[in-house]
Image (spheres, grey):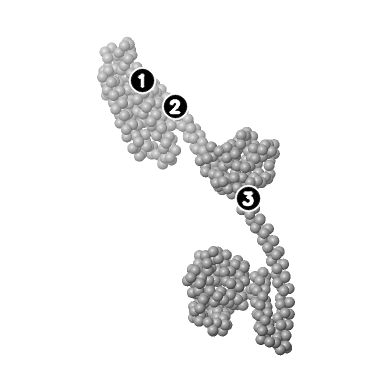
């Protein structure tokens, strides 16, 4: 009984397929060569190798051809290669036995055909050589024994003695010699196959390790945020990572077609590579034109490749945004200095304003003034108060106070603020309402700053409503990507905000109101930022505006 196969790996499956193809080709070649030569010798020569009629030899050759063609036709559809291989070995053993029988059994010159099957089985299966040698010994010994005892009688030419007339010791000795050769070849084949499998396994493991290492190298190469270009000695790019393609703005398909001038337009890359010979160019910065025609700032360093490789490694980064950010920071610092100076000046302006306002009020009360003079003094007081309010807004924006957080009910803050604002709009046809939840809305915030936010937002809505209108201040729960939040909204049905003003609505001094300072919403934004909250404006020109402040989730107690 043939040995059962262990599950074949994909590599073993491929090797067995190759061996089976070799076996079928070798079978046809062997039959064609040996049997063809035998027929020629037997027809043209004087020595008889087959003691059977020639038609039986022809029939054997044709049968082998037909059977091999059939096996080749079904080969690609075979699922169980192990059973198919065992069948092929059995077929070859049967073919060898028939040839031995037809060529005289004991006197046959063809027992060596068994050795070919044994050697192939040693390569195909771990213990296949020993099993095949055992079956070869059984089949060869059975043919010789049956012929020796006269049970199996091949066609014999006249003048030749039957096997039974041979010396029994000669028969046993020759059979033993062939069987010994069978197992010797099985042993040698097994050792050779074991060494081959061991070497093949080690080679496969090395190949897998090398592929993993290559894959890891490629992943690391493409994962680096800096561009990496490998140049040959002529400056042509041999390799470029993903970040390099992105920075240079080129496609991978153009890697071979572009030289150094095509990759680094405007950069003296050739001169820089020459400077790095024998050392390293640590840092260089310049401008280049990418594939899209945009001029960008590039920082790079160049190193010479180690022997035996020849060329250069260029590591580069796109510094365009970084340099723009540096320029913005410098500009911001300058503005900050100017802001601090302006805040100091504004702070100093408040004292003269207070003195002027106080003096005018004293003069107004102590002097007997005509109506025209009294109106002029009222104008001075009004403008002084407006200027003082502007200074206060500017100082609040330039030096926002640190919020003092405490647990408060937001409903009370909204109600008190709206009630205060209602007293100033009694003469206008504007309905100011609130929409508040019934349960307490407990939040940790600075109530005075939130009160200022509501006042500024409602005042903006009052300025946007021309004639009659409605303004609503509401508090409700909401959901955002970060989770549940508290939404404080101020809505109106006024004129809305122009689209060109909306993107810069929170910048200082940006306003479309006549006489407005442009600091109201800027102060609101500063106070909201201090509360680590967010603010959103939705407006349709001619229909109204809704400003929503996103505060943390409220508690009921």
Q: Position of residue 53 (x, y in %)?
A: 26, 18
Q: Which residue is mark 1?
A: 33
Q: Quadrant of residue 379?
A: bottom right
Residue 307, above or below 429: above
Image quarter hosting the C terminus: bottom right
Is residue 234 placed above or below 494 in the rendered structure?
A: above
Q: Is residue 72 visible?
A: yes
**Local crowd at mark 2 within 10 Å, few (<14), some, or many (≥20)?**
some
What residue is disc 2 on? 184
- Looking at the rendered structure, the secondary structure element under dot 3 is loop
Q: Residue at x 54, y 41 (%)?
A: 214
Ranked by sequence position, the earlier of labels 3 and 1 is: 1
2 or 3: tag closer to the N-terminus: 2
Q: Label for residue 319?
A: 3
Q: Position of residue 62 (x, y in %)?
A: 29, 24
Q: CA distance from mark 2 to mark 3?
A: 75 Å
Q: Quadrant of the N terminus?
A: top left
Instruction: Please identify the quarter of the rendering in which residue 315 is found.
Output: top right
| Mark 1: secondary structure | helix
Q: Nearer the viewer, mark 3 or mark 1?
A: 3
* Residue closest to the eye, 429 or 142: 429
């Amino acid at each position: 009984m043939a040995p059962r196969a262990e599950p074949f790996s994909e590599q073993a499956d491929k090797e067995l397929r190759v061996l089976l193809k070799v076996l079928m080709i070798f079978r046809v070649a062997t039959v064609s060569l040996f049997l063809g030569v035998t027929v020629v010798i037997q027809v043209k020569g004087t020595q008889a190798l087959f003691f059977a009629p020639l038609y039986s030899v022809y029939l054997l050759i044709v049968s082998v051809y037909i059977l091999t063609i059939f096996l080749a036709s079904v080969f690609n559809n075979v699922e169980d290669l192990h059973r198919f291989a065992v069948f092929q070995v059995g077929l070859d053993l049967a073919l060898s036995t028939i040839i031995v029988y037809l060529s005289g059994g004991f006197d046959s010159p063809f027992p060596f055909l068994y050795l070919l099957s044994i050697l192939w089985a040693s390569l195909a299966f771990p213990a296949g050589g020993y099993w095949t040698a055992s079956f070869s010994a059984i089949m060869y010994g059975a043919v010789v024994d049956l012929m020796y005892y006269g049970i199996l009688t091949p066609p014999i030419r006249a003048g030749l003695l039957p096997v039974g007339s041979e010396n029994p010791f000669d028969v046993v000795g020759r059979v033993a010699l062939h069987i010994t050769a069978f197992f010797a070849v099985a042993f040698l084949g097994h050792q050779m196959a074991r060494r081959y499998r061991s070497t093949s396994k080690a080679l496969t493991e090395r190949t897998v390790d090398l592929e993993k290492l290559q894959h890891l190298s490629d992943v690391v190469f493409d994962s680096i945020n800096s561009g990496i270009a490998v140049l040959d000695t002529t400056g042509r790019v041999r390799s470029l990572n993903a970040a390099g393609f992105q920075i240079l703005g080129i496609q991978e398909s153009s890697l071979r077609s572009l030289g150094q001038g095509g990759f680094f337009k405007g950069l003296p890359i050739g001169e820089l590579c020459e400077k790095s010979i024998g050392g390293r160019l640590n840092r260089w910065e310049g401008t280049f034109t990418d594939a899209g025609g945009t001029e960008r700032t590039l920082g790079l360093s160049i190193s010479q490749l180690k022997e035996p490789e020849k060329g250069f490694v260029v590591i580069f980064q796109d510094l365009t945004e970084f340099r723009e950010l540096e320029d913005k920071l410098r500009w911001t610092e300058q503005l900050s200095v100017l802001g601090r100076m302006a805040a100091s000046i504004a702070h100093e302006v408040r004292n003269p304003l207070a003195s002027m306002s106080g003096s005018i009020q004293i003069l107004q009360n102590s002097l007997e003034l005509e109506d025209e003079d009294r109106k002029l003094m009222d104008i001075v007081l009004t403008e002084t108060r407006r200027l003082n309010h502007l200074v206060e807004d500017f100082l609040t924006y330039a030096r926002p106070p640190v919020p003092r957080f405490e647990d408060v009910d937001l409903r009370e803050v909204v109600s008190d603020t709206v009630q205060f604002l209602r007293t100033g709009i009694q003469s206008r046809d504007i309905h100011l309402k609130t929409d508040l939840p019934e349960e307490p809305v407990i939040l940790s915030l600075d109530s005075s700053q939130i009160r200022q936010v509501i006042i500024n937002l409602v005042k903006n809505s009052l300025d946007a409503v021309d004639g009659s209108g409605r303004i609503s201040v509401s508090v409700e729960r909401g959901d955002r990507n970060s989770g549940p939040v508290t939404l404080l909204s101020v809505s109106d049905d006024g004129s809305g905000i122009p689209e060109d003003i909306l993107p810069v609505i929170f910048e200082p001094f940006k306003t479309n109101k006549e006489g407005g300072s442009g600091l109201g919403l800027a102060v609101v934004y500063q106070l909201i930022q201090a509360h680590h909250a967010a603010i959103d404006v939705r407006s349709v020109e001619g229909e109204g505006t809704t400003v929503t402040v996103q505060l943390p989730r409220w508690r009921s107690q």
